[in-house]
Image: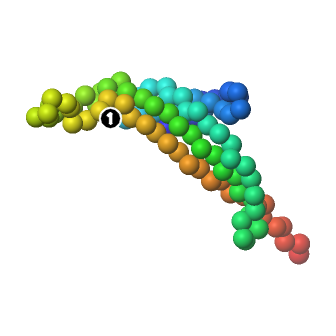
Amino acid sequence: MVGSKRIEKAGGGYRVVGELTLHGVSREVTLDAEFAGTGRDPWGNQRAGFSAKASLDRREFGLVWNAALETGGVLVGEKVEITIELEAVKKVAAASSAA
């Protein structure tokens, strides 16, 4: 994703809407996201976890190459699943030095 445009509350989770560019083609994509919670790591840093998923058709991005198989199917499927597991660490403010 080039960047998120907006985050919307959706039921028990969220929707992250942004622009994804593949093969030089940009499209708006919506990811269904969940907040997994927060906690402190062994070094005292505050961390938050998130998961997000989306499904798209690769042909919408100009990715149309395929090859027929001898068994009658095709080599590459049209549906692409995107899964993101994200862990964010809260930035600690720098301590000011008094002189």
Q: Can you name the residue that lies furthest to the bottom here?
A: 99
**Quarter placement of the C terminus:** bottom right
Foreground residue, 4 or 80?
80
Q: Is residue 30 above or below residue 85?
A: above
> What amino acid is labelled 1 in the image?
His
Do we see residue 25 in this rendering? no
Q: Quadrant of residue 12?
A: top right
Q: Position of residue 36 (x, y in %)?
A: 68, 47
Q: Is residue 2 left or right of residue 57?
A: right
Identify the residue at horizontal 50%, vertical 42% (top origin).
83
Q: Quadrant of residue 39?
A: bottom right
Q: Is residue 83 above or below residue 21?
A: below
Residue that label 1 marks: 23
Do we see residue 44 in this rendering? yes
Identify the residue at horizontal 75%, vertical 62% (top origin).
40
Identify the residue at horizontal 68%, vertical 34% (top origin).
13
Q: Can you name the residue that lies furthest to the front here?
A: 71
Q: Position of residue 62 (x, y in %)?
A: 30, 27
